[in-house]
Amino acid sequence: MATEIRVPTLGESVSEATVGTWFKKVGDTVKADEPLLELETDKVTVEVPAPAAGVLTEIVAANGETVGLGALLGQIAEGAAGTAAAAPAAKPAEAAPAKAAEPAAPAPVAAASAAATSMPPAPAAAKIAADNNVSTADIDGSGKRGQVLKGDVIAAVAKGISAPAATPAAPAAPRPVSSADDASREERVKMTRLRQTIARRLKDAQNTAAMLTTYNEVDMKAVMDLRNRYKDVFEKKHGVKLGFMGFFTKAVTHALKELPAVNAEIDGTDIIYKNYCHVGVAVGTDKGLVVPVVRNADQMSIAEIEKDIGRLGKLARDGALSMADMQGGTFTISNGGVYGSLMSSPILNAPQSGILGMHKIQDRPVVIGGQIVIRPMMYLALSYDHRMVDGKEAVTFLVRVKESLEDPERLVLDL
C-alpha cells in the first residue's frame, strides 16, 4: 500500500512553498518521521517528515518547484513493495505484445520520450533556461515522465548548449552580457523564497515609511563591569550565560513605555498603540536574516529574556523556527556589532515604527569630568518612521536607552 507525501500546513498567510532539497532519492528506505525534504516558504524553512516507514517510490515535486498546500510531493510504499513500484518506466513494456524479445528495450525509451513532450519544464528550470538562452526542448529531462529539471538545465549550460535563435535577442538581456571568459566563472543561483521576501520587505519599508535614523553613543563600562562581576553566579543559577542582549532588551522596553509612539504602527489612517512589548531580535543564519520575537519582554526579568533569546537563537540556527516564533513583533533590535560593524543605519521591520541598531564595542578616548579617559564605547542607531514618530520622541527614546545602560541598576530597580 502506498502512502502519499503531501505539503503540510505551513502557517498563517502562507499558501505555497518551494521544494528546497530532497534528502532521499527514489528507492531509498525511509523511517517514519524521518526528514524527507525541505520546503522553503517566504518566512521559514520547513522539514517534511516521512508519514510512514517504507521505500520512497516516487518524487512528484522536484527541487525548485513551487507547490501549494496539500500538493502531492511523492509516495512511499510499505516494506518490499516499494522496490517494485520504484521502476514505473517498466509498466509500458508489460502492456506491449510479447511476440518478440527485441521490442522490450525500446518500448520504455519511446514511452519516456513521448511523456517528455507532454511535461512542461519545472518553473526553476524554465527560468534558468530563459536567462541563459537555452531551449528546454533540446535537453533530456531526468524528472518524472521526462520533465526537465533545474539540474538538467545547469548541466546543459555547462556543456555549452544554447538556442540558435537566441543570439539576435542578446542585446535585450536584463544585465550586461559578460565575455565568454567571465561567463565561465559566474554562477547563477535562484534566490530562495526567504531571500526574496527579505528583499521585498526591506524595499517596501523604504518605499512606504518616512524613514530617518538618529544616532548616539553609550559608555558600556557599567554594564561590562556588572556582567563580569556576576556572570558566573548568573550562569550557575539560571543555566544561561549573561550577555548584553538582556540589558538592551530591558532598556528598550523601559523606553517604549515612556515613548509609546515608537511601539505603535500605522494602519491606513489609524494609529495602533501596542500596550505590550514583543521585541524582535534579528538573527543571521546561513539561509538569511530571521527575526524571532521575545513576547511580553516588558514583563520578563533579564534572566528570562536571556533564556528566551538563547532558545530562539538555537531554533534559528537549526532552521526550526515556527511561524508563531516570528510573528507579532512591535519593535526590533539588530546587533551588527557581533560581525564587527562600527556604525550602520538599520532598515525598519515593517509595519513597526522603530528598530535599534547595536554595534561593536570599541575603546575610545572620551571626556568625563574634564579628563580624557578611555572607555568601551558603542554607537547606537535608531531608525524610525517619521510619519509616526517625531524627532523629539526618537531622540528621547535613544537617550533613555543610553541612560539605562550607563546606569544598569535602573533596569533592576525598574526606574
Image (cartoon, rainbow, N blue to C red):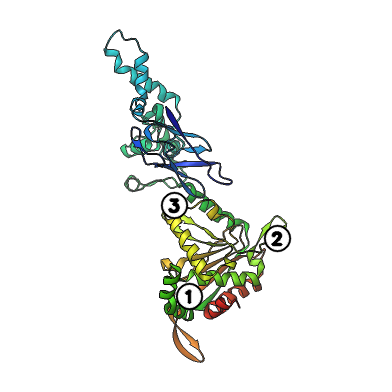
Inspect the image, locate mark 1, and give the three-letter code of the amino acid beneath it: Met
Residue nearest the viewer, comparing 94 with 357:
94
Tell me the mark number nearer the camera, choosing from 1 and 3. Answer: 3
Q: Quadrant of residue 74?
A: top left
Disc 1 from disc 2: Cα separation: 33 Å
Q: Position of residue 322 (x, y in %)?
A: 51, 51
Mark 2 in CB contact with mark 3 (< 8 angstroms): no
The secondary element bearing badge 1 is classed as strand
Mark 1 in CB contact with mark 2 (< 8 angstroms): no
Inspect the image, locate mark 2, and give the three-letter code of the amino acid beneath it: Ile
Q: Residues within 10 Å of mark 3 (few under 14, many from 20)?
A: some
Left or right: 387 with respect to 231?
right
Residue nearest the viewer, comparing 22 with 276:
276
Q: Where does the N terminus fall, quadrant-wise? A: top left
Q: Is residue 322 visible?
A: yes
Q: Position of residue 395 (x, y in %)?
A: 61, 74
First in sequence: mark 2 vs mark 3: 2
**Residue at 65%, 72% in the rendered image:** 258
* Mark carried by residue 271: 2
First in sequence: mark 1 vs mark 2: 2
Q: Quadrant of residue 326?
A: bottom right
Q: Is residue 214 visible?
A: no
Left or right: 34 with respect to 43?
left
* Mark carried by residue 359: none
Reading the image, the residue beneath label 3 is 319
Q: Position of residue 89 (x, y in %)?
A: 36, 23
Reading the image, the residue beneath label 1 is 378
First in sequence: mark 1 vs mark 3: 3
The secondary element bearing badge 2 is classed as strand
